[in-house]
Amino acid sequence: MATMLNKRLANLLQDPQLSLFDAEAKLVAGAGGEAGANAGANAGAKVGPGALPAPREMLLGEHRVAYELKRARRRSIGFVVGSEGLRVSAPRWLPQADIERALQQKSDWILRKLVEQRDRARRVQAARIEWRDGATLSYLGQLITLQLDTATRAGSRFDEVSQVLHIGLPTGAGEAQIRDTVQAWLQRSARTAFEPRCQHFAAALGVTMKQLRLSSAQTRWGSASVDGTIRLNWRLIHYSPSIIDYVVAHELAHLREMNHSARFWDVVRSVVPDFELARERLREETIIAQ
């Protein structure tokens, strides 16, 4: 009897039904919740980043996990971990006891994804920029300070010595006005910073970049087209030169290998030998529209 039950659950838990949460592939406009890095420290603690309570709870290992259950016309059980926690989709005819057994079987995956989501929410919150006088933001991997300065006649002026961005706006300027002014400067700075790195790596790889375009993509740091056009997300200007170099080399390498095969990564490694470090760091980051 137990063998038949396990076989039925195995058929219900087909891997294609698991919608894995991809932290790189989703724009987050806002996320709350405290960091979940030490979620395993306290037995019985709730695990899940969502602000809204779910209608059901279950003990998975030492953690009480809240989840939303949705019944639908389907043949298998699906799990999705998103910004509001765990969502379970199950066939209408499936007994609750079978759903709970399935949750137990996938408990390691569920707990890991919930902790990853809470850590991601923490990073998003830490990276959020306050658009006000005296606030700081990351520029080329270093913190710089925003300073409203009516003596700056138009736009913005950056003082490399003091690491202060002087913004030509009155002290009563609103958040939207400050944001638009600073982002315009960041985009100009991005093109100025990216162009020479593109030329450098294009020469090193023996490829021709026809043009560089700045992107505001919500899910991608860069892309390459067969016609030689390279698109780079202007928000890369927030990160250190080593990360920018990796993305630039990555996209230009596609002009030789339009894939992610072993040959492609060998091309990237030929110009950025330690690219794995930058790649891992970038995988932890989230594109935030602000």
Image (cartoon, helix red, strand yellow):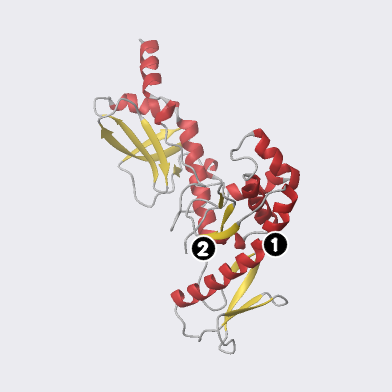
The residue sitting at 65% across, 61% down in the picture is 194
The residue sitting at 39% across, 35% down in the picture is 79
The residue to which callout 2 is attached is 128
Depth order, front residue of 162/118:
162
Tell me the kind of residue under disc 2: Arg
Q: Badge 1: how crowded within 10 Å, few (<14), some, or many (20+)?
A: few
Q: How many marks?
A: 2
Observer-side mark, 1 or 2, equals 1
Q: Position of residue 11 (x, y in %)?
A: 38, 19
In the image: residue 281, left or right of residue 182: right
Tell me the kind of residue under disc 1: Pro
The residue sitting at 46% across, 41% down in the picture is 21
Is residue 141 at least partly visible in the picture? no
Position of 186 relative to 207 (above/below)? below
Position of 62 relative to 178 (above/below)? above
Is residue 219 at least partly visible in the picture? yes
Depth order, front residue of 28/206:
206
The residue to which callout 1 is attached is 196
